[in-house]
Amino acid sequence: MPDTKRFKRLPAPVRLEDTVEESDTRPVPDPEGGRDTDRDFLFRYGLGGL
């Protein structure tokens, strides 16, 4: 059976002025690793039958 006394009262609200906005500013790595994946696809599958 859940403890109903624990959820009788909500915590005090947090004022918007007391909050801090955070954003990640680290550079995101290139998911393609600097390669031209469209060209690689053409070489592998599109031009392979020539």
Image (cartoon, helix red, strand yellow):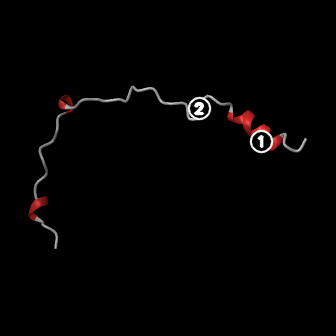
Q: Nearer the viewer, residue 21 or 44?
A: 44
Which mark is on residue 33? 2
State the CA–CA distance, disc 1 to disc 2. 18 Å
Horizontal and vertical percent position of residue 3 = 12, 67
Depicted 10 relative to depicted 32: above or below = below
Q: Residue at coordinates 41% horizontally, 27% vertically from top-left?
A: 26
The answer to which image quadrant residue 47 occupies is: top right
Judge the density around disc 1: few (<14), some (14-19), many (≥20) Cα neighbours within 10 Å: few
Horizontal and vertical percent position of residue 27 = 45, 26
The reply, left or right, for residue 25 in relation to residue 37 is left
The answer to which image quadrant residue 25 occupies is: top left
The reply, left or right, for residue 5 in relation to residue 47 is left
Q: Are marks 1 and 2 in contact (CB under 8 Å)?
A: no
Residue type highlighted by circle 2: Gly
Q: Nearer the viewer, residue 48 or 21?
A: 48
Q: Residue at coordinates 11% horizontally, 60% vertically from top-left?
A: 6
Judge the density around disc 2: few (<14), some (14-19), many (≥20) Cα neighbours within 10 Å: few
SS type, badge 2: loop
According to the picture, the residue beneath numbered tag 1 turns out to be 44
